[in-house]
Every structure is written in C-alpha cells, then in structure tokens.
Amino acid sequence: MTLGLELNIGKKIELLLIEDNIHDARIFEEHLNTGSGEFEITHVSDIKSSLENIAENSFDIIVADLNLPDSKGLETFKEIKKIAGNTPIVILSGVSDSDLTIESIRSGAQDYIYKGNYEGDFIYRVIHYAIERKKLLKEIEEQSKKLVELNKNLQELNYNKDKMYSIISHDLLSPMNALKGYSELFKESYMEITEEEKLNMIDTIKELTVNSIELTKDLLLWSAANTGHFDYKPEKLDIASIIKKQCELLKLTANKKYITIITEVTEMFVFADRTMIETVIRNLVSNSIKFTPQSGKIYILNYEKGDKVNVTIEDTGIGMDQDEVKKLFKAEENVSKTGTGMEKGIGLGLLICKEFIAKNNGTIDVFSRKGIGTSFSFTLPKV
C-alpha cells in the first residue's frame, strides 16, 4: 500500500497514539500498520505521559483521544497543542463527540477519525494527508513571511529612489546653480569689484564646490550601500589609529568653531572594512561638529566589551528629544537640520553609518538630551 506521500524513504513515521482504551488502541495499530509497517507507534493512555513523550521526542504526527482519565475535552487538545507546536494532530473521536471534534478542528487539529471507522486504507490516508497538509501550511506561512519582507524591502527601495530623485533635483542642483551664478557674476564684474570682494567670491565658489563634492560622495555611498555595490573587504584594523587619522582631517573644520576634539583611545584591533569604518567615524565626528556650538567639546573613546570593541563619540552640542532620536536611522523620516554654524546637509550621513556598521557585523546606538549633547556608540567584532 502506497500513496506516494512518504516523508522519508526508509525512515519510519513516528506516531504518538494517545488512547486510554487498550482494545481501541490495539485495533487502531493493527489497521494502520497492516501491509505497510511504515509507522513506529508509541502508545500512551493519559495526558501526563502524553506531554512527557511530546517534550522528550520528535513525532511526525499525534493521534489523540481527548477524553482521558486525567484530562477531558477541548482542554486535552489545548494542552497537547501547547507542547506539540507544529506537529500535526488528528483527533480520535467517538460518534457522540462530534461537537468536541469540530471545536478541536477550529482550534488547530488537522483532521479526525471516528473510532471503529477503519475500513480499507481510510486511516492510512487520513494520517498521511494530515502530515502533508501541515507541511504545506508551514511552507505557505514561510512564503507569506518572505512576501511581507520582500514588500517591505520594495517599499524601502521605492522610498530611496524618490529620496534620491528629490536630493538630485533640489539639494544637488541648488548649489550647482549658485556656483554657476557666482562664476558668471565674478566674470562679468571682475574689473569693477575690489580685491577683497574677489577673494570673498572665490571663497564662496570654493565652499559651494566642496559642498557639492561632499554631497555627491554621500549620494554615491548611500546608493552603493543600498544596492549592494560597495566592495566589502574586511581586515584586521587598529581602530585607534583610524580615529586619530579622521580627527586630524577634521581638525580644521572643528577649529573654525573653536571646538576641541579630545581622543582618549588606545590600540584595539577589529575585523572590519577600512573604507567603511573611516566613513562612519568621519560622518559621526562631522555630525558632532555640525551640531556643537562654538567652544564646545567632542570626546572620543574606545573600550573592549566581550568579543566586541565599542567606540563612543560624545559631544556638548544642542542634543535632541526622543522623537528626533527615533527618526535618525529611518530613511522615510530622516530630515536634515541646519547646524549651529548654519552648516547644510541632506541627512544621509547617519543612514550610511547604519548600513556600514550593520555590514561589518556591529551595532550602532544613540543617546541624546536636548540642550545637553549627544552620544553615538558603535561596536565592531574584536580580533
């Protein structure tokens, strides 16, 4: 006898039979295994033994009479279901228990068999179909979860596309148009304006050019991070040397606002991509400079915690309330703010940091208090 539904060729199907009537249990076993011998049946007669067996063993299917010496009715099914998890359950029912059988089906039972109704291959088919039906339902649930995740990713990609278009059409074109305008004005008025005015215009053109370059870099980094086109090349790195190097590069920017960067870092090795981590530190320190008033301070320290190295960048800046903090790493809610020195930005820096830290198997957190300051911390795997 075969229906082409065997779980594993050569492996017996493990079945737990819960039935307190010895005579009914023997008849059930004889009819199920007649001619096939493919079932390994464990028989118990009370709820206590049932739950112990389910907890200790892995069954392919459970066939249960719900009226037992130590448990009655739907409560029996609920107790079994709670321990059995995804294991399919078939109810072994008397004709007079039809209401109980229906309630059990509504509560998650796969099928039912009336006691004594064992003609031909009926119970064989019920058992196999219950197993296959449960497997199919599990696959459908898994596919549904995947579809939900894919839909979420698609929505994020669509938002990123719209945000990219908005940035290119406004944030990138605005400084370029300004650059064009200043260049034309400089050329047309060159003979009429003073040397001081010329130098001021050159400084403005330079600033617009630098801002456009930085904006383009951020756009390219963000796009690469979101599309998986950024080369990931992890290696052993001394995080302290990377911090010192990036702080040195940002020293001039900090000096313009009389901000002191204090680094209390020691040699610690992590396994990460150099370019990504340099970008993260540069963005976080730049962010602190941007939102720290003149004569403020930025503290940077590192320490080991378990199998991770933690880096913390703390400033004495303007801080944020909790609503602002919650929006920081969400592309759909992230909005750039003007810095304390009227610095402009497009709000991509922290999104890039989140992507890069996650790619390097780390985490990033932020703590902030309005008017007090902000602290960013990230972790990386320790070598």
Image (spheres, rainbow, N blue to C red):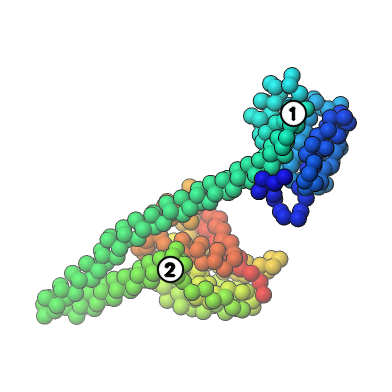
Residue type highlighted by circle 1: Asn
| Along the viewing direction, whichever of 291 and 276 lies nearer the viewer | 276
Q: Where is residue 27 drawn, in percent x and y?
A: 83, 33
Residue 287 drawn above or below residue 11? below
State whether residue 78 appears in this view.
no
Q: Is residue 236 placed above or below 144 in the rendered structure?
A: below
Which residue sits furthest top? 96
Q: Callout 2: 10 Å neighbours few (<14), some, many (20+)?
A: some
Residue at the spot 74% in from the left edge and 19% down from the top edge: 96
The image shows residue 202, relative to residue 333, as above or below, that is below
Residue that numbered label 1 is attached to: 117
Under mark 2, the amino acid is Ala
Q: What element carries label 1?
A: loop
Q: Which of marks 2 and 1 is in front?
A: 1
Taking the image as shown, residue 252 lies to the left or right of residue 383, namely: left
Q: Kindly indicate the quadrant of the structure image that contains residue 379.
A: bottom right
Question: Which residue carries the number 2 mark?
Answer: 224
- CA gap between label 2 and label 1 equals 64 Å
Q: In this view, does 58 lie to the left or right of 184?
A: right
Q: Quadrant of the N terminus?
A: top right
**Residue drawn at 85 percent across, 38 percent down:** 43
Left/right of residue 185 with respect to residue 138 in the rendered view? left
Query: Residue 48, which numbered label?
Result: none
Residue that appears at 48% across and 53% down: 150
Mark 1 burial class by Cα count in 10 Å: few <14, some 14-19, many 20+? few
